[in-house]
Image (spheres, coloured by chain):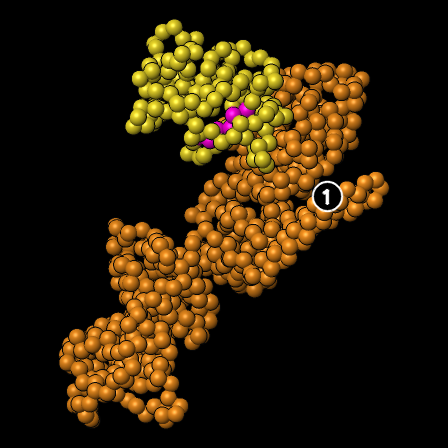
Amino acid sequence: MSGDDPIAAFRVEAGDLLEGLEQALLDLSHQLDNRGLIDAVFRGLHTLKGSGAMFGFDALATFTHHCESAFDRVRKGLTPATPELVSVILSAMDHMRALVEGDGAGLEAVGSDILARLQAALGDAEQPESAAAAPVAAPSATQSAKGWKLFFRLPPGAMANGTNPLILLDELRDLGEAQVVAVVDDLPNLPDLVPTDCMMGWQVELRGNISREDIEDVFIFVMDDMELRLEPLESEEEAPVAAQVETLPDQSAALATADPSAAKAATPRASESVRVPAERLDILMDRVGELVIVQSRLSQLANSGVEGAAGELALRSISEEIERLASELRDTMMVLRMVPVASLFNRFRRLVHDLSRETGKTIELVTEGESTEVDKTVTEQLADPIVHLIRNSCDHGLETAEERLKAGKPAAGQVKLAAQHAGGEVLITISDDGRGIDRARVRAKAEANGLIQPGQVLSDFELLQLIFHPGFSTAAQITNLSGRGVGMDVVKRTIEGLRGSIDVASEQGKGSTITLRIPLTLAIIEGLLVRVGDGRYVIPLAAVEECIELPVSEDLRMRGRSMIQLRDALVPFLRLREVFNTGTEPDQFQKIVVISTGGERVGLVVDQIIGSHQTVIKSMSSLHREIASFSGATILGDGGVALILDVMHLVAFGQQREARLRAVG
Amino acid sequence: MAESNKPQWNEDGQLEVLTFDVGEERLAVEAVMIREILDLLPETKVPGAPVLVGSIVNFRGKIIPIADLRVAFGMAIEPSTPDSRIVVIETELDGEQTHIGLRTDKVHEVALLNQRDAADTPAVGLRWRRDYARGLVRRPDGVIVLPDLPQIFQSAQRGGEGRQPLGLAY
């Protein structure tokens, strides 16, 4: 593990395990009798217990152990898996997560509460079972007063991985009086014998009051691959162990010296890392190789002394080559930061499962396009908005089962989460087949809140946009899930912070669809380069609606007013020369760049529009970060610096100023 | 003055510094903080920024602020001369390592200062805020000021010397 903190590595590994476990449990809740899933859950719990104990997370190991033994009953078919059981184990998993992350202090009460519920869930499930089938003597008893008869066989490669059967046998002997017999019936003939393979099995009779877990703990590190049969000793002894022979393979002692934990601990992973497929690195390598070749061509040209038209032509071809390589390198590099949205979507299955229980509605989550890739930082920031939108769909959108049946829909509501690429954007849609947005209620609510005038004429689009207004919530009854009116505006702001946008479509009675459009990456944007006074500024092109001319005569005529007539609407504008206090005279032909965000528009008066510009966003030092008008800076082709305008801030500022002016008179 | 901002004299009572002029004062900054000395670069004004760090430049693909210490020491801003240079220092600001360019009128030399020549900043007779200097050092050719750069930048961040003016109702 080369100096890495093993505890941190364990936390990462446990996080992965818990995530896998959660997925398996959620799948299980739909297919309660799927053996493969039951086994997967059991294995997950088991591995977690094992590695938890190994790294000193004793509280975790003990707690997980109880869950594991409860689930073992399901695995053995003694108790059927029930939805209750699955959801108790899900909440148990949350507890495990807390134990993994913290030191377990103060969590005991939560843990024992969950265990009590677990017992209850098992108990409930047990009754019909025992009533129906004539119960056999419970072989799953975790305690056997007399002792145990066990047989185990290690996988052939066990010794190569550092397992020493001798030590396992010694540990068994420590538990109680043991009689060990080697089982050699699988031993191959001498010519076929591979000396490093463990081909033997052992039959052991352990006497004494020993719990099943104690025995299983002996095999904790090899359990997953080995063959282990455990039976409690019956009162009358059938066929006692034949001989007192203890044959042990000689080579085992010599080979098995390594720490058995070595194999388990060999997969540490730093928490802040991105997994990159090797082929993508190969592409990057190819591009860098080409770049080196072009560079040597360039220095050859510089040294060759070719002048005139021939030299110019050669230089131009090299310049074109570099331009192509630079853009390819940029694209390749960006792809390296991409991760599939599947990791994001998987989190929501649990959410929908919980929401379904909380609301008492049957909800199905359908996901599509999980392999769509998005910049890693974008996925992280998308999680919260999507949680909110799904909560909204489940809570407000979907009807109860009775209402659905009455409306001629299937009883189970459906929430669909889909992702797809479209141009330079990723579209993420959250749709439901619920009741849709009730326009009349939205209008009534907005009128009640004073957002619109009673009877004001609004387009359908404008009406739906009202739900993004701060402090707006249509749920007549505030529930635990949503309806606190702090949400849609936050969602909108987060998405716009990612330079994305959000659309709503809704059909009454059929359901709603919310579409998030997110740019693929945050590091490079298309910008419009403008000049104001003698400073140059970049306006994100995505926000630019149009550019129009503002002749001086017109400007003079408008003295005192800052509104322009744009087709059918009045748009307030800001003279950036005044805002930035450049102290220069306006150009003769000023331009107005109309920018918009979330339906609100503002015009920015600039002196000159220089053109579009591929903008690599650079952050500014903390001395300048809090200046709200700029979201960053970029370096221009001539080495100079241009500031990037913060569209959201400018639009809000322009609209506020406009509102103030209107209020004054 | 925060304890950590005190000059770190070595065991021989010496301190290796770079000396330079800002207006009529001679300043010294520890040589370990200096990253580079550059000719003047084309600067971009940042509307609304603190006056002390009113502009930014492209320093090898990184955007760094340019500070004019004349603002902190209450001197008039003067145009640059052929001797003007930018001294790029690295210092910790809000817990991050930050590069900042200091606009200087002339860079002199890397010198060793002696602790026995050092004096605390006097309480009276200064034209600038006392906490902006960590001490004075007497030298044959005059007095050298050890500026307290972290203090100066923190005060600028809080708007100490005012901000670049913005128009309208900003």
One can see residue A76 in this view = no
Label 1 element class? helix
Lateral position of residue A141 relative to residue A47, left or right: left
Q: Nearer the viewer, residue A376 or A7?
A: A7
Query: At x 36% / y 92%, what residue is drawn?
Result: A190
Total labels: the figure holds 1
Q: Which residue occupies 37% across, 88% down?
A: A193
Q: Main secondary structure of the magenta part?
A: strand
Q: Nearer the viewer, residue A87 or A149?
A: A149
Rendering quarter of residue A494? top right
The numbered mark 1 sits on a residue in which chain?
A: A
Horizontal and vertical percent for residue A343?
51, 57
Q: Which residue is the site of mark 1?
A: A303
Identify which residue is drawn at 66% across, 37% down.
A540
The C terminus of chain A lies in which quarter of the figure?
Answer: top right
Confirm whether residue A9 shows in the render. yes
Letter of the chain in orange: A
Q: Is residue A190 above or below residue A463?
A: below
Q: Colour of chain B?
A: yellow
State the image coordinates of residue A273 (x, y, percent, origin top left).
Answer: 48, 53
Q: Which residues, given as a range, are shown in magenta?
A: B86-91
Indicate the position of residue A275 as horizontal and vertical percent values.
51, 57
